[in-house]
Image (cartoon, grey):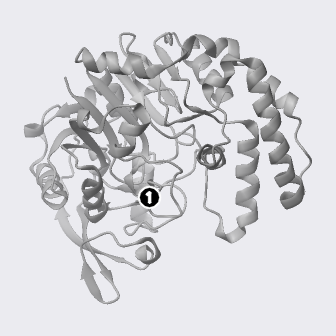
Amino acid sequence: MPVTAVVGAQWGDEGKGKIVDWLAEQADMVIRYQGGNNAGHTVVNQLGEFRLHIVPCGIFNPQTTCVIGTGTVVNPLVLLEELEELESKGIDTSNLLISARAHLLMPYHVLLDRLEEEARGDGSLGTTLRGIGPCYVDKVQRSGIQVGDLLDPDYFREKVRRQVREKNLLLQVFYNHEPLDGEQIADEVLSARERLLPHIKDVLPIVHRALAEDKKIVLEGQLGALKDLDWGTYPYVTSSNPLAGGAAVGAGIPPHKINDVLGIVKAYSTSVGKGAMPTELRDEVGDRIRTIGKEYGATTGRPRRCGWLDAVAVRYAHMLNGFTRLCLTNLDVLDSFEEIKICVGYELDGEQIDTFPEPHRQDHVKPVYETLPGWQADTTQTRCFADLPLNAQRYIRRIEELVGAPIRIVSVGPERSQTFQV
């Protein structure tokens, strides 16, 4: 059976959660491989509408083992709230595992995120203020606290004391902030310990047993390729690697075992926060897309920047991930448009280019558009490619041509039933 990495092919918010939920109906395991609770996945199925922030979207299938992988950062208090909310709606969460090697996102990370953003002033990065960056900083500088440290409360307390002593120097000297109480922080996090203990595991043997038994595994990413720490619109990026290569590391699966890379492409472009977005529409058309598509962040509620599909950016994501297939989501949002544009290239310094440039030049490109006729028909009841309006079919085929990867799944609404294979 295939190991499928589900990767956002744009700036995030492409509908990955919806597709992972759909795939999880047939999956034995879903592994969230990077990121934290800084971005959410909205899932609508027969059980209701849910907004997940760190729990994998396979949680709604009780036969699917869900893993919060080693590449993630986990706020235990937020996770506890999410589990309680799911259970209050009748969702069984006993199939959830948390890698003991994942890093704990602590209260001081959230505080530092806010203080750092405030200190940047006009140069702020537009973070979600969830503490993700500071937590990954601790991980990279080898001073982080791992989920498995909760297994030994005394050891955990000592690590918290040491971290808080260091953080207090930073808080007092640079931010003129009152010192934190390490014991209080340790108590606050340990309050979630008993509830989380049954879920904390050494997940590597479990994952590799599933591989050996030829189980179907889905690797769930967060955000998208254009927010990748190394290859995205730096510095307006996330602090981890949403690419398929990051999936192998974050899930603990050898790269050659990932034999299916599914790129999720929204039928238009959206982005939250700052950074280059060449096709952004700051007019009534952009507002119309936002309104029809209900383009507001699942975690923060922030309005998303909206624009036409940027085929150059998606092709760039394909180069980085090697998509074996694509899923086109939110096609129905474009149902009422008389004309639809696709960005097929950029103009930069008087020349036309067809590649995504390096970060310092990204803000200077102008999109070169190709205009296609709209279909002006309701697609939300469509359940196969042949029943789509002819112009919608042509739009899909043109995206395939421009990106260089086949579209094999189409979604025309938020429900599971509104997703079909091509």
What x and y, as percent, mark residue 289?
Answer: 39, 55
Q: Which residue is mark 1?
A: 230
Q: Residue at x 26, y 29 (%)?
A: 3
Q: Is 283 positioned to the left or the right of 216 in the image?
A: right
Residue 221 or 393: which is nearer the viewer? Answer: 221
Residue 317 rendering spot, x and y as whole percentages = 30, 55
Q: Position of residue 342 (x, y in %)?
A: 25, 64
Q: Residue at point 18% right, 43% down?
A: 324
Residue 181, compared with residue 113, is above or below; it is above
Tell me the residue at 48%/17% (across/down).
96
Viewer-closest of 415 and 80: 80
Task: Say if residue 415 shows up in the picture.
Answer: no
Vertical relation: 152 (above or below) 126:
above
Left or right relative to 271: residue 300 = right
Q: Is 252 positioned to the left or the right of 344 in the image?
A: right
- Residue at point 31% right, 34% down? 254
The quarter of the displayed image where residue 108 is located: top right
Is residue 226 depicted above or below 209 in this figure?
below
Image quarter of residue 260: top left
Residue, far bottom:
350
Q: Position of residue 183 (x, y in %)?
A: 87, 28
Circle 1 — which element? Answer: loop
Q: Can you say whether 308 is above or below 143 in the image?
A: below
- The amino acid type found where label 1 is placed reads Asp
Q: Quadrant of the C terminus?
A: top left
